[in-house]
Image (tube, rainbow, N blue to C red):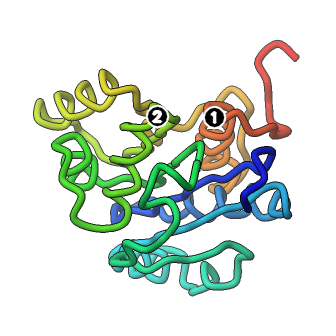
Amino acid sequence: MGDKNTRKIVVGVGGSSGSIYAKILFDRLKPLVSEDFKVGVVMSSNAQFNWEYELDSRDYQNYPFQFYESRDFMAPFASGSARYETMIICPCSMGLLGRIASGISSDLITRAADVILKERRRLILVPRETPFSLIHINNMKTITEAGGIICPAVPSFYSKPQSMEELAATVVDRVLDLAGIETRTFRWGE
């Protein structure tokens, strides 16, 4: 894992509704896992509950990622020296987004996001909330000014998705593009 050619990604799964987005993200990342592509995952307890409630499964446990507990501050991405290059939080609740914007590192997800920002690496947040209050908008502005990317879970329709999974994939594929991860997806004009 010390090889500088190894890509290391952190995925945080927050407790908002929208577990389908996390599942599609996991599905897209699964075939990439190798000695040269590492995925660390931390899920809040609400994220686990929502996955089970919304998707009627616990299959998040079956992915070939390294999972970390929410209070595991010994996880490698709790420090900038581990050189995780990208963090994706999908979905991201507004409470979680607000804690990140305020610099509150009270669990592993918020600590990892703080590390990514301080190291000037790529943080991508996928909020799934509507409507946005002014507090939400100001928190998103703060994160954007700190170098983070806000990519709301707003699907597109020009690819004519035929299922809920295809619709969710329009968001996830955009997130992967933002993370610099190659994916086969609908491209406008191609």
Q: Earlier in the sequence, mark 2 or mark 1?
A: 2
Residue neighbourhood size for the residue with mark 2, other residues' Cα within 10 Å, grouped as few (<14), some (14–19), many (≥20)? some
Q: Which residue has dot 2 on it?
A: 151
Q: Is residue 158 left or right of residue 85?
A: right
Badge 2 vs badge 1, beta-carbon distance below 8 Å: yes
For image coordinates 39% across by 81% down, the residue present is: 49
Q: Amino acid at mark 2?
A: Cys
Left or right, 87 with reference to 132: right
Residue under label 1, please give it.
174
Local secondary structure at mark 1: helix
Q: Residue at x 88, y 17 (%)?
A: 190
**Could you say which quadrant of the image residue 47 lies in?**
bottom left
When asked about the image quadrant of residue 38, the answer is: bottom right
Where's residue 179, x and y in %? 63, 37
Dot 2 falls on a residue whose secondary structure is loop
Q: Amino acid at mark 1?
A: Arg
Quadrant where the N terminus lies?
Answer: bottom right
Residue at 73% across, 48% down = 7
In-front residue for pair 136/18: 136
